[in-house]
Image (spheres, grey):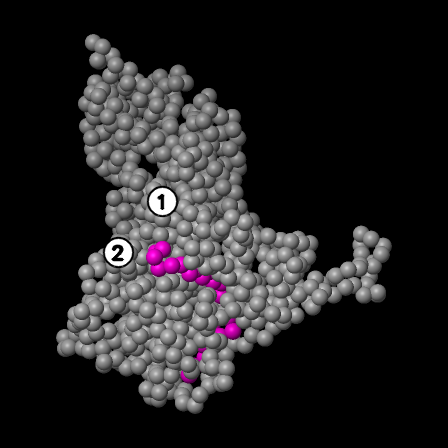
Amino acid sequence: MKLALAVLMLCTMAAAQTPAQRAILAAREQIKKDPGKSPGYNDLARAFVRRGRETGDPDYYRQAERAVLDSLRLEPDNFEGYKARVMVLLGQHEDAAALDLARKLNQRIPDDVLTRGLIADACMELGDYPQAETQTQWMLNLRRGNIPGMVRGALLRIIFGDTEGALDWLTSAFRLTNATETEDRAWLLTHIALLRLQTGKPELADQLLNQALEIFPDYYFTLDALAETRSAQAVDLLRRAQKLAPHPRRLFALAVALKKSGSAAESERTFGEFERQAVRISTKPDNANRELIFYYADYAHKPPEALRVARAEIARRQDVRTLDACAWALYAGGQYPQARAELDKALKLGIRDTTLFAHAAAIAEAVARAISR
Amino acid sequence: MFQVKRFVAILMAATMIPPVGGFAANHRSAPITALDHPAGITDWYAFVSYDDPTKVTFIMDVDPLLEPSNGPNYFPFDPNVTYTMKIDNTNDGIEDITFQFQFTTQFKAPTLPLGFVGAGAGINGPANAPASLSSPIPVSGAVIPPAITSLSGAGAAGLNYSQTYSVTMITGTGATAVSTNLVPAGTTLYAVPSNVGPRTMPNYTALAKQGIYNLGNGVSVFAGTVDDPFFIDLAAAFDSLNFRSGSSFIGTGGVLSANQDQNDSQNYAADSLSGFNVNTIALQVPISMVAKSSASPVIGTWAATYRSAQTIRSAPSPITTSGALQQVNRMGNPLVNELIIGVGSKDTFSMSQPNDDKQFANFALDPILARALNAVYGITVPDPPRTDLLPLVQYSGPTIPDGTPAGPVADMLRLNTSIPPTPQSARKRLGVIGGDLAGFPNGRRVSDDVVDIALRAVAGAVCGAPVSATGKKTVCTAAGNPFAGTQVPALGDGVNTNDVPYQETFPYVAFAQSGYSRIHRNAGDKTCAQAAGCPAQ
């Protein structure tokens, strides 16, 4: 009876754990058994990276980095250790460094599929979409229908404006993903929901986000998305997410939501807090510069500040979101042709995004007005 | 929406395709190909036809190690794979002509449990046959159809599972390519099934011969299951070069005696592929169809397999293209992917094009195999860079006419079609290094012993040999001292010939071994292709 209870308790505990937590436990067990070898530490590093994504807590990346150091101390040339380091760098938004290391690993073992995926991830973050496409296509060429290839391909299809194609692959990836991979499944559902929202199906998006929260409760990523489908509850949802995974980026979204809900004073306070925090991390890789640009352009009415931040950020990365933010800073500063040129760089990729289209319309109107004067 | 942790690096960690492993073996060249047998190219041959020097024969073998008795469905070609033979006749490593083959499967009687069944004139249900479920009367008529004596029509009642195929010639590449259907109207090409056994297929040779089709204009084609023409001590080769050192060898395993080396019809170790079949596509075409001109007789050839591609970019609207293909595997020279390309690059090699092979040049210029031979056998090998091996990957060497552009480094099987075939009695298994210019690496015949040739070439056997038709020679050094190919011992696996005789006429390979009576030779067995038995050593 006692044994049955113990087993039941263990099973309950295991069920309550997330995939990353289970992976952390398993890696620690492996390290206990074989403390002198690198694989356990590599597993631990990967598990911490997963946990970092599950929680949004950057401390897990620091723990992952320590595990990588342990791994490389034991076996200085181990390939998997360096791969784990690339994952850590990506989690910390050190995208250029991640890309540099991943490329070196790719030269060493061109056939390693995950390394190709890591290059694609870094390239997408930095806005090198042709290279991201090359690497992702290679993954799909190697084997049709592999989940990591399809997921990255779906994200690229969004950039290239093939929303239906992206939905197709994300849905396929969801169906193929093991039920125990709860965070992966919630992540996929959230992306699918965001695309449904973009295509004018907010009710369906809401259902999908609910489903995601059932699979992985209190997932900050899903709560953020839900705030977009439920404007009346946006403030509460964003507060909840901010409590779970605090980040200056979300403070901006919260301030905007507060303003929309009529809480002007609280919105002002939140904007102020956002600016303080965002400025403090502005030169760091994991920053809130895009939000800071929009804040200076639309709320603080400081176009020169918006442009200053935009120029610094665009020097770091040229992804579609940064191009859009930069274009908006130029627009706010009255540099309409330059704004149009910047946004065109994003739009010519084919992306169909309501925010970008709205910005493009405003910029085009301003250009036309300027010409007619 | 603001973006949070978008990266997908760790996503699907549990379902990620497994990292490629270290497996490689002759007939399963790259990790991914090892998982895709129907698309896995085992061997590629190109030679001037023995019995008609105005024609060239191409043979592409796929799907390795087919056990002849492995019923009931035996060995179909994969209808989802596009099989191709490619010819470069402009020395740039890019195909100018492609022959493409596509298979289709038919089931005549889907309720029958067997794909191939038959006996004599057919076996009827006897008087005591049980009643059928759908009828109260006993089953009458043929329970077992008549033996299979034909690929279609009468005599093919028991050929329940059959495959037909198309042959298309594509000239050029990309949007300007021109496709020509080589199959005459009204002709159906049947793939020859495996040799199930004497009851089901009482005259298999006659049945297989029906699978040789003359398509007109001097073109012949054959597709089906045949005896695997390749011969090798696979087990020893991939047991870290653990060649046999039994009583038949003198001294060290892996080094043949003079007698052994000169006997091209006897084996001194077991042919690991003995008794195994393989799927083959053989095509014979006039040389004038593939060579640029009689003044430019050299062609570069390779085989490639494709599956439909899954592309990130969708088709344009309106849809103007379809059927995008992705290369799964390729083969030009034998054993390149198996013995030269590093295990971490094998899939990349399989999926890339010959004219991009510069990326793999270091594998050839400093081959690990040479270092392994040095380490295992203690023999002296040349210093890198191994420019003596360039003739294998460029248009150069003693069989290439002077003035031929060398072209890029590209793994292709090059064939000077103006060199006439060597009569069977004078043919040498060692090809060019054995003094027989009609053999490998001037193309590759089924009887060429590419294992022994490759071992010796990698060990430096062509150092000091002519690299041009006018006699320009390669220069090698070992530890800084002059090195000549004559220093290389007679390396070999002890398997000098196939376990069954080849044919001297198209398709040149032996027809499939019988599932009922196949024999796999064991280690230590002596085998030879002579009906009278093995000659004394």
Amino acid residing under circle 1: Ala
Q: Residue at x 39, y 69 (%)?
A: B50
Q: Which residue is drawn at 15% across and 77% down?
A: B482
Answer few, some or many: residues within 10 Å of disc 2's Cα (few below 14, many 20 plus, some between 14 and 19). many
Secondary element at image label 2: loop
Question: Is A322 left or right of B143, judged from the image as shown?
Answer: left
Amino acid residing under circle 2: Asn
Question: Is A148 left or right of A364, judged from the image as shown?
Answer: right
Residue lying furthest right in this view? B136
Inspect this view and state whether residue A183 appears.
no
Q: Nearer the viewer, residue B445 or A336?
A: B445
Q: Which of B438 and A282 is in front in this view?
A: B438
Q: Residue at x 14, y 77 (%)?
A: B481
Q: Which of A293 and A28 is in front in this view?
A: A293
Whole-percent x, y for residue B42 in the image: 42, 64
Residue corresponding to mark 1 = B177
Residue A71 tag number: none
Where the C terminus of chain A falls, by quadrant? top left
Residue corresponding to mark 2 = B91
Q: Which residue is drawn at 25% across and 76% down?
A: B461
- Quadrant of the image occupied by residue A153: top left
Whole-percent x, y for residue B275 in the image: 51, 73
In the depicted structure, whether residue B116 falls above or below residue B167 = below
In the depicted structure, whether residue B207 falls above or below residue A293 = below
Q: Report the span colored magenta.
A: B268-290
Q: State how far apart marks 1 and 2 are (Cα).
A: 18 Å
In the depicted structure, whether residue B310 falls above or below residue B409 = above
- Quadrant of the image occupied by residue A364: top left
* Mark 1 or 2, nearer chain start: 2
The reply to whether label 1 and label 2 mark residues of one chain is: yes
- In which chain is the residue bearing label 2? B
